[in-house]
Image (cartoon, grey):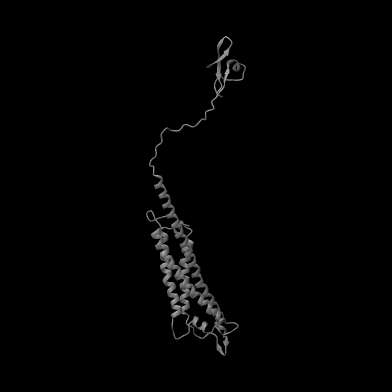
Amino acid sequence: MLERSLSATGGNIPVPSYYTGLGIHLPTDTKDNGSIHSSDFLSLEKRLPNFPTAATFDSILPSSQISLQINSRTTNETRSLYVSRCRFFIRLFSTFASVGVVAGIASAYVEYYSTKDRGLLYAGQDIWPEYLDMRPSDTLLAVGCVTSFFSGGLLIAGIFPKIRHITRLSDILSLIVAVIGLPLAVFGACFLYWYNNNYHTFWTWSCDNRKIDHPEAQFRVVCGEIGFAFSMSWLVAAAESLMIINVIVGCIVVKRKNGETRLGV
């Protein structure tokens, strides 16, 4: 209880007063009239939770060192992401090119076998000779089937993170498929182009007679379809070459822990 001094006639009279907690002192009679229902003062002090007076940290790194670590980690993730995305698009392109090889040769074969045994003539001669050397086109068709199988299979296997991301397993599989596809594609294209025999090949006969205007035998179309397959074979070789470069670059620029990283697309 605090006391307040009031000036009165004849001297100072001490009057009991109470602190309300609002910065105001009220006399005792005010309290008794019911304006204040408790003698306990109200506190306007902001209540804060109790915090420990001391805190310990296992290790405190300087801000500059933390910044360097964050920047380094971000750079590594970015590199891994770029390598992974490039690998995906290269594999996708190689798969489409391999399918293009198969589609080109297969379409030409459909045209050939649908007219071969019908005895069609042009200027008194058979439009298709009795014997055509089909080995070069057969070889390119086989190459397209093999590269489509391996490249498409690896592309589908990319649904698994260990193959889709930049990992040791991904590097090995990508390198194996590229090493298989590159020489096969080059061999198939070169064999089709430089093969020389006493007989006409399917491609040379079709292209030599592409100016013949026959209503049922479309030599120009057949020549173009085989030429398309030939071009797609070189694109497969180019894609697999880029894949080998991608694997090498990934091994150099992407930092790994124990040879593994789960970063990528």
Q: Looking at this view, name the residue that lies furthest to the left.
A: 258
Residue located 46% across and 62% down the image: 86
Asked whether residue 113 appears in the rendered view, the answer is no
Of all residues, the one furthest to the front in this rendering is 10
Residue 187 versus residue 131: which sits nearer the camera? 187
Residue at the farthest bottom position: 124
- Measured along the vertical axis of the image, is residue 180 above or below residue 25? below
The vertical placement of 99 against 16, above or below, is below
Residue at 50%, 80% in the rendered image: 203
The residue positioned 40% from the left and 47% from the top of the image is: 64
Where in the figure is residue 211, as x and y percent of width and height? 56, 84
> Residue 56, percent across and down?
39, 37
The image quarter containing residue 181 is bottom left
Q: Residue furthest top?
A: 10
Closest to the observer: 74 or 250?
74
Q: Is residue 252 visible?
A: yes
> Residue 54: horizontal and vertical position, in percent?
41, 34
Q: Nearer the viewer, residue 265 or 155?
A: 265
Residue 112: give x, y in percent of width and height. 54, 80
In this rendering, would 147 be left or right of 22? left
Q: Quadrant of residue 194?
A: bottom left
Number of marks in the rendered image: 0
103 up-or-down from 121: above or below: above
